[in-house]
Image: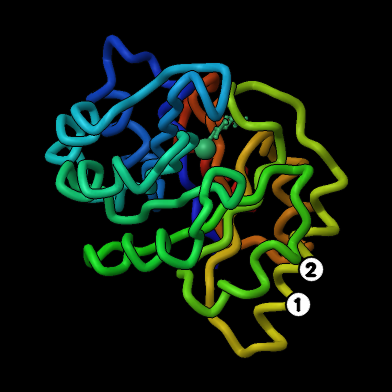
Amino acid sequence: MIKIAPSILSANFSRLADEIKDVERGGADYIHVDVMDGHFVPNITIGPLVVEAIRPITTLPLDVHLMIEDPDQYIPLFAKAGADIISVHVEACTHLHRTIHHIKDLGIKAGVVLNPGTPVSFIETVIEDVDLVLLMTVNPGFGGQAFIPSVLKKIKEVSELANNRNLHIDIEVDGGVNEETARACVAAGANVLVAGSAIYNEKDRQQAIAQLRG
Ligand SMILES: O=C(CO)[C@H](O)[C@H](O)COP(=O)(O)O
Ligand SMILES: [Fe+2]
């Protein structure tokens, strides 16, 4: 079962509530929220106040992707604001195991994220502890970038690692996901597809979501 997570990074922020309701009506499974701090990535986006404001707008799970330094400092704020899933980058965590359990101790699903240049071996010791692995298929920081095909091999590696250990985790991909690259990601083993521009740049979001789902 493929899940679609529209990224509100590509939504019209002046009409954010309507943009969220539109993809919910269109069949989205999660709302993907990209949090950037201007340090870990060269862009600044959304904070806990916005997560709190959109929480009552939708019944869909809020899938919060933290692209920030020192995530431990902010995890409780995003949890309080209403996040259902919080994912942290391995590249931003000195004590990755502790951070994952920090999220889980707050009663929230925990995800771990790998940049395109980071090998899958970096999560081998924590994969049993997480609910999802998010593989970046672009270098994080901006929407609308081109999919990096070399990540397909990593999707397969994570899928095999999870199968070998009998783990039922979600494998999410994020960046440059469109109808064509979505097929390749699903064939490699991904089951959650984040898409910003491929959904929000289309007038008919229901159709865009259906096409991504395949
Ligand atoms: O995490 C992200 C960027 O760092 C976004 O979720 C991602 O870029 C989605 O946008 P698009 O589908 O347009 O690539
Ligand atoms: Fe993201």
Q: What is the three-letter code of the residue carrying label 2? A: Glu
Mark 2 and mark 1 in contact (Cβ < 8 Å)? yes
The residue under label 2 is 157
Q: Nearer the viewer, residue 43 or 102?
A: 102
Classify 10 Å Cα crowding around label 1: few (below 14), some (14-19), many (20 and above): some
Q: Is residue 170 left or right of residue 59?
A: right
- Quarter of image, res 81: top left
- Residue 112 appears in the rendering: yes
The residue under label 1 is 160
* SS for dot 2: helix
At 51% from the left and 23% from the top, the residue drawn is 39
- Residue 203 appears in the rendering: no
* SS for dot 1: helix
Image location of residue 24, percent across then percent down = 32, 41
Q: Nearer the viewer, residue 20 or 90?
A: 90
Q: What is the three-letter code of the residue carrying label 1? A: Glu
At 57% from the left and 83% from the top, the residue drawn is 167
At 26% from the left and 69% from the top, the residue drawn is 105
Question: Ligand 1 lies in which image quarter?
Answer: top right
